[in-house]
Structure formats: C-alpha cells, structure tokens
Image (cartoon, grey):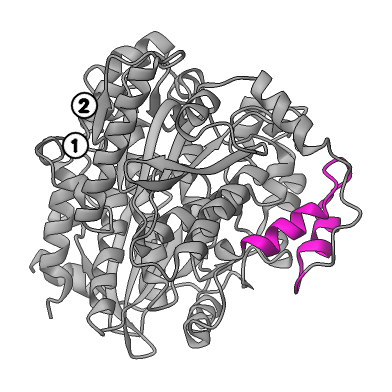
Amino acid sequence: MSEAYVQTAAASAPLLRDSFIELSARERARALLDAGSFRELLGPFDRIESPWLPLQGIVCQADDGVVIARGTIDGEPAVVAAIESAFQGGSIGEVSGSKIAAALELALADCERGRIVRPVVLFETGGVRLQEANLGLAVISEIQSAIVALRRHVPVVGVIAGMVGCFGGMSLAAALCSSLVITKQGRLGMNGPEVIEQEAGIEELDSSDRRHVWQLIGGAQRAATGLADALVDDDAHAMRDAVRAAFARGLEDTPRSAQVEAYLARLAQIDPATVTPESMRAVFHGGAPAHAGNAPTQASEADRTTRSIEDDTRGARWFRALAGESAMSAPVWSADAPLGDERARFIAVVPDADNRFPRARTNVVGLDQGWRLAQAVREAMAEDAARNVRRPIVAVVDVKSQAYGYREEMLGIHLACAAAVDAYASARQAGHPVIALIVGPAMSGAFLAHGYQGNRIVALDAPGTMVHAMGKEAAARVTRRTVEALDALGETIVPMSYSMASFAKLGLLDRLIDGVDADAPNDAQIERVRGVLVEMVREARAGSRDLSHRLQSETAKKTRAASIEVRRRLAEQWNEA
C-alpha cells in the first residue's frame, strides 16, 4: 500500500467524535471542508522540516506543525491552514509560517485572476517559535500582509477553538480576519497570562487564576465585546456551520481592524482605573459609541508633548531631525516633511508620561499607540486617495516592546496593534512607499505593528538597534538558558541573534547604515540617512507592492532557502487533481 494511498484514506475517514477541540489539526481541517474534498498539500511525506531545530537538538515534525488542505466549502474552492498545538505549542517558525503565508498568497493570486478561493485559518498558537525568533516574526508579518490583501476579494475566516488559544503576533493575524469564530474554551490575547506575570509581576496578573483569565480574554468575553464574531459550542458540526455562515455573509462589513475612529471613541469612554470585563461589554458591544464626554481628565497636549521631549529617546530625536519641530502629540508623533523632491509622512512612537494606561508610558506600543499609528497612516491614505503619486510613509522605529498589562489584554491590545498592521499594509498595497527606519530596538509585536509591513527596512548599525521576538532576559527564561548562552547560540543560529548584522543576513534588511552616531547625529549624518530613505522610496516605487522582494536577494536565497522551497513546492501542488 503506497504512502499516498494511506494519506488519502486517512483524509476521507469519518470523524470519530463530535468535539472540535479534541480533533488534531488535520482532523479539524477535514471537518470544515465538504465531505470527501480534503487534499493535503506539503504533508508529512513531503518532509519539509525546520532547518533550525536540529541545530539546537530539537526533534523536528515532518509537517512542522501546520496542515495545509485544499478542498471545497459549500461547493466553492477553499484552503484551510490549521496549526497543530501538539508540536511546539503551535509556535510559528520559518517553515510552518511560510506554509500559511504561501497558501494565503496562492489563494490571493487565484482571487486576482477571478477564481475565488475561500481561506480559513485555524489558530492554535502561542505565537513566535523562539528557537527561530526573527524568522518566525518575519513570516508572521507576511501572513498578516496576505490576509489584508485577500480581504478585498473574499472573507478570510479565523477559528480559535482551544485549549492553547491564540497569542503573540498571530493574535494580530486573527484580529485582521474578516470574521473570527471562537469557542468559550478559546482564548485570544497578545500577551499570554504567563508572559504578563513574568514581565509585570503577579500583582498585575495572576496567571494561575483561570477564572479571571477567561473573564479577560476567554471566548465568551471576546464575542460579547465584538472582538470575535461568533461564539460556537465545542462541536465539529456547529463549527463547520459557523464557518459556512461567515462566508455566506460576504464582504459586507468593514474589518474591525480598519474601524479606527470607532474604536478610538470607545476607548475614550473607558476609565482604566475602574474598567472591568462587565463595563467593557457595555461600551464595546453593539453599534457606534456615545460621545465620550466623561473620559478621564488628561494633561493638556502641550504638557504631554513637553514631558515626552524631556523623556528623550532615539525615536524622538530622529523624528525631530527628519521631520522638524512641528506640533506633535504623544504617544504617537506624526508630521509631513520634505524628503528629496517630495513630502513624506514621518511617524514615531514616543514616551508618554501621562498616558492613562500605566503600562504604556515608555516607548512601547499599547492601546493608544496602536490606534494612533493606524490613524496617522490612514489620514495620509485618505488625503492621497485621489492622487496618482502617493506620499512615502516613514516609520521611525524605536519600540522596546508591546505594553504588558491586564487592562491592555482586556481592552484588546492585539486589535490595536492589528489596526496599525492593517493601516501600514493597506497603505503599501495602495501605492504608498512604506519605509521602516530602525534607530533603536524593534521588538516583537511592537515592530509588527510599527515597521514590519514596510516595502523596505533600513537600520542604523549602532549599539542599541536590534530586532527580535523577545527581550534577552525573557527569552533566556523561556528557553531555559542564560543570557550568555543565548548570545553564544545567536552566533550560529542566525534567526536567534540580537545583532543587526545577523538580521541583515536573513534578507529582511535592505540597508544597514554604518558610521552614524545614533544618539547625537551631526548634520552630515542626518543627510546621509535622509539620502538612504530617498533611495529606498525610489526602489519601493519601482518594485512590487507586496513583500516578495524579501525572498529575492542572494542573502535570502541562502538563509531563507526553506521559505523559498515551501513556496515553490506548494505552488506545484496547488492545482493538482
């Protein structure tokens, strides 16, 4: 009996139980497709495995923990990407993430040719796989880009069943979906409870208090506050019906991650000192919110800006160097200024000593920051909508993390950050050259929100600039290593390194700018950086509006060979009978 026959026979076998949560990723994918239509792509027998795990003594799984299945839903062509939580906690590495991104990109290509493919993503993940840190983060940004592009043609449906839930950068991908289906056992948040306790202390959140955790981020709460669209019982048949209903609704609604003004208004009604899951339901449920006349008193805009300048950061310094001293309001500075022979929009996240969310007062991306980033980008898009040539958008990146706090999770920091991702990706796809200029740390979900959707990414080669999925001390704790051991490992496992030179080896950095004082640049150095930005804008306008150039350099062909191979072989199998 051939391996192919065994695989096909297993795919067509009937479900042995009704619980959706108890099914494997392969069984879940099959349960959502029409009976007998399941066909797996890049399955275990193709043996495309992580090239990075064996180097760390970790046993690979032949499908790297992600199942890609073609078939039909209600007779229409469909693709399902299902994450298997049983392997590495559903974490996303180069191969697993590339499988999802490539499947969505192929569905997009079909949709653009008028052949609609219904995409479903089954999220069961803790986010980035730290053993492949920077490549995991990169492929998540590519998944996000594909979702935003696909939504113009067909609903993208996400499913969160449980028990792992959906966290990290993949929570942003879930928030970008046109429709999100969740069970009461499912959880959805950017930072897992254990991570919040680790980073902010048990006083902030006791991760062992399961009742409280589910009150904050559980499926029932997410559905009741509009952060998920359908709450479904743990039943395979009910889940299948919910997914079909999501496609039946079509493209009627504006994705929640694009509803910037509505969510800013809702957030303004919240008093962080007194907000509870119940009071959040009252504000976030249903239609447009009332005028936020009773929002907590804040410092004047002038005071807020002055205090932020006193808390000087690289992001603030470089923003002023490139965009000038125009009127700005913390925590997100945005201004238009000359760049070459045109004007560009410069955007930076800066400290905000008076931010009403205490965990978001430094250069981190929190609730206000995410929504304000989206607002600044979408304002430029709206102003340029009727123009043939659209202004460049420069993200000045100095963000040390996302905000870690129970208020942030309760109020949907994952959606706030997804709104920024959505705005940057939409601007790039609409023809705005989006350039990320890394002048400080560019960490984890904060970088996904602010910079990673750029057509081009450039960085200063200076102490303190870095890209990574997690800070060193936290990553050492999670991987059970010392910081010294982590640094040593980064010398051989390139995606785990914290150095910008190593990041450049991944094919993700378009220019590493040396010889610049990152903290106190002189006029000549500022003009040199400005010249690089002009060059990147020119390249972006001449290139594609997607992120495919990241795989085209000679560097990428070596270090991201697995990403390229996944796309090649998946494309070969895509339309096979």
Q: Residues within 10 Å of mark 2 (few under 14, many from 20)?
A: few
Q: Are marks 2 and 1 in contact (CB under 8 Å)?
A: yes
- Answer above or below: position of 153 versus 527: below
Q: Position of residue 88 (x, y in %)?
A: 39, 41
Secondary structure of the residue carrying numbered label 1: loop
Q: Position of residue 430 (x, y in %)?
A: 37, 64
- Answer above or below: position of 121 versus 218: below
Q: Which residues are magenta?
A: 260-288
The residue that appears at 8% across and 69% down in the rendered structure is 1
Residue 55's label in the rendered image is: 2
Q: Residues within 10 Å of mark 1 (few under 14, many from 20)?
A: some
- Nearest to the observer: residue 392 or residue 159: 392
Q: Indicate yes or no whether the magenta region holds residue 22.
A: no
- According to the picture, the residue beneath numbered tag 1 turns out to be 51
Residue 113 sits in quarter: bottom left
The residue that appears at 50% across and 59% down in the rendered structure is 174
In the image, taking residue 478 as reference, residue 101 lies left or right, namely: left
In the image, taking residue 57 as reference, residue 83 lies left or right, namely: right
